[in-house]
Image (tube, helix red, strand yellow):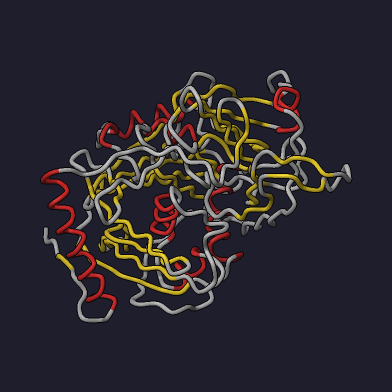
Amino acid sequence: MRMTASSGIAILLLATSIYGLRQVGAGHSLSGDARVSARQPALDYDARLGSTYTVSDFALPVVPMAAGAQTRLTLAVGDGQTLAGVLASADVSTSDAQAAVDAARRVYDPRKLRSGQFVTVDFKPGDGSFQGVELQADSEHLVTVSRSGDGFTADQTHLPVRTELRAARGVIHNSLFESAAAAGIPYTVTAALIRAFSYDVDFQRDIQPGDRFKVMFNNYVSDGGVRSGDVQFAELILSGRSHAIYGVRREDGNVDYFTRDGKSIKKGLLKTPVDGARLTSGFGMRMHPILGYTRMHKGVDFGVPTGTPIYAAGDGVIEYAGWAGGYGRFVKIKHNPHMETAYGHMSRIASLSTVGQHVHQGQVIGYVGMTGDATGPHLHYEVLKDGSQVNPITVTMPVSTGLEGGELVAFLKTAEEREQRFAAIADGVQFASAAKTK
């Protein structure tokens, strides 16, 4: 079986089986659609950057997949990413990806694919061969591309849809994934929230037992089931401090998130470039468990199952992609003249991760593994400033963007209305829904 296909299932099982589904305090839950679904010459990276220990202290178990289980990998589209790019990041061959995109063009314009949209890639149980792709063209149309003989066919299905506004809240005991699942929040919504909050929230250290969350989002309900839509409002209350975000859909179809005063949440770098991660080793001096002496660890390790997607922490250009000695399969991205990020121990490097390739924040650049000097599957992540490693947890590279003028005035009014609607829905006063008849 292809590792790409199994990785999507491992992520879903991680969110449900490993973290568990213990009930926590919640508002209104829902029945959501939570489908998730030749080595290069060695680079003497250690010699250039000094001694760095990269072995994980901790390894999460890989959850076995049931025999004959459907293999579906759901990926979020990154800024500027094409449908062919999404398929390539799932390790679909160039010929199959192009054939699938050509088939899709018969019923859908792939140029309309927007950032944050989810694309589901299907693989055949057993041999893991690529079988097709599915995406929601809009709230009323589902595009399905399926393998047929030596080629692919495409179909666009009309979905009579009604839109429901849903709200949920709860207390975090062990993890946001666990508590959100117990509150009935679909996996895709939780994943979107983690990516959005990751600009400011360190999910390994900032989350404490007793912290709280609130979420309001759209559900698209049709005969085919329930599909989660845009996040309207979300809030994390961490150690008494509120972190609130509000989703705004732009004219180009992209969804941007802003703080209560209309400032963009986007920063230059993500703090956690992998979903569902657990920090297993921090930045600084530590005892080398194999060599038996103290050694500087110039990055951070995130323990996650093999095959988990790794995201580019920010926009930039790939400087290196290949084997790097003790770092195993390794990718390095240059974000600006002063800042770089590095990712080690990958099981696989994504097909589009080639030297000189421009990547967007949140784009899949590889998959977690334990290549090189590693005792368990994890991502070793480094941030370099002017060529020297700095602590990835504390470094910032802010981007100053926000709403102004009439857009800001309209946003502030919308934000207040959403807070009021959340309170009404969460308190059981009403469910806002808009029926669409066709």
Q: Nearer the viewer, residue 234 or 139?
A: 234
Quadrant in the rendering for residue 237: bottom left
Count of labels in the image: 0
Residue at position x 14%, y 46% in the image? 407
Query: Residue 27: percent from the left, percent from the top?
Result: 35, 77
At horizontal 45% and vertical 43% (from top left) the residue drawn is 121
- For this view, does 247 lie left or right of residue 395? left
Q: Position of residue 190 (x, y in %)?
A: 42, 59
Camera-side residue: 80 or 385? Answer: 385
Residue 46 image point, x, y percent: 74, 27
Residue sitting nearer the eye, 173 or 41? 173
| Vertical placement of residue 170 versus 162, above or below | below
Instruction: Single out the residue that lies furthest toward the right.
Output: 292
Residue at image coords 64%, 44%: 300
Q: In x, y percent, where is residue 98?
A: 40, 26
Q: Nearer the viewer, residue 74 or 144?
A: 74
Q: The C terminus is located in which quarter?
A: bottom left
Quarter the N terminus occupies: top right
- Where residue 296 sits, quadrant-wise, is top right
Tell whether 260 sits left or right of 147: left
